């Protein structure tokens, strides 16, 4: 099994340097969803701890919500992640591509709720 802290450290270091790295599953071998979520939590926590970013969690993100896409990616459930303040831009604001290693744009549907949802 791969060490989530070590995997997260690789991603954090790559992001700080602004360089791409090989996929973790290529260099560390396959790992299960629980390890992936531990890595994600460590990366998000590191971002939130850095004073140079507005990286507080501002929303959640769902992925692989269709059965067809789950089959294509060989998973059997939707995945979730976190949207931090520095990942979002307001309508009409420019997207600074130089902030990213491999800029990509993915349209998303977002909902702004008046009240928090119960857990």
Image: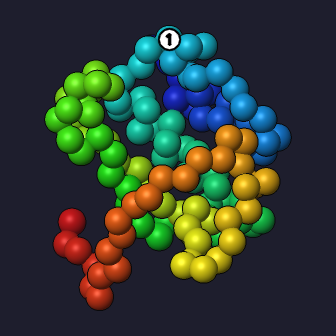
Location of residue 49 by image quarter: bottom right
Location of residue 93 by image quarter: bottom right
Q: Residue furthest right?
A: 17
Q: Is residue 13 visible?
A: no
Find numbered disc 1 in the image and state the secondary structure of the residue it sits on: loop
Q: Residue at x 54, y 79 (%)?
A: 91
Q: Is residue 97 left or right of residue 31?
A: right
The quadrant of the image that shows the C terminus is bottom left
* Up/down of 26 relative to 50, above or below: above
Q: Is residue 18 left or right of residue 66?
A: right
Q: Residue at x 47, y 70 (%)?
A: 58
10 Å crowding of disc 1: few (<14), some (14-19), many (20+): few
Coordinates of residue 76 in the picture (x, y in percent): 20, 29
Coordinates of residue 40 in the picture (x, y in percent): 49, 42
Coordinates of residue 33 in the picture (x, y in percent): 35, 30
Q: Describe the colour scheme in one phrase.
A: rainbow
Q: Residue at x 42, y 29 (%)?
A: 35
| Foreground pick, 95 / 10 | 95
The quadrant of the image that shows the N terminus is top left
Q: Residue furthest bottom?
A: 114
Location of mark 1 (residue): 29
* Up/down of 91 relative to 64, above or below: below
Coordinates of residue 88 in the picture (x, y in percent): 55, 67
Q: How many marks?
A: 1
| Foreground pick, 7 / 77 | 77
């Amino acid at each position: 099994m791969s060490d989530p802290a070590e995997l997260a450290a690789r991603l954090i270091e790559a992001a700080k340097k602004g360089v791409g790295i090989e996929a973790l599953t290529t260099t560390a071998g396959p790992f299960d969803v629980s390890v992936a979520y531990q890595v994600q939590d460590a990366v998000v926590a590191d971002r939130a701890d850095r004073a140079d970013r507005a990286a507080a969690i501002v929303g959640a993100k769902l992925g692989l919500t269709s059965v067809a896409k789950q089959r294509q990616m060989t998973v059997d459930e939707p995945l979730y992640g976190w949207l931090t303040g520095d990942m979002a831009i307001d309508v009409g604001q420019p997207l600074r591509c130089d902030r990213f290693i491999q800029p990509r744009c993915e349209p998303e549907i977002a909902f702004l709720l008046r009240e928090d949802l119960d857990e």
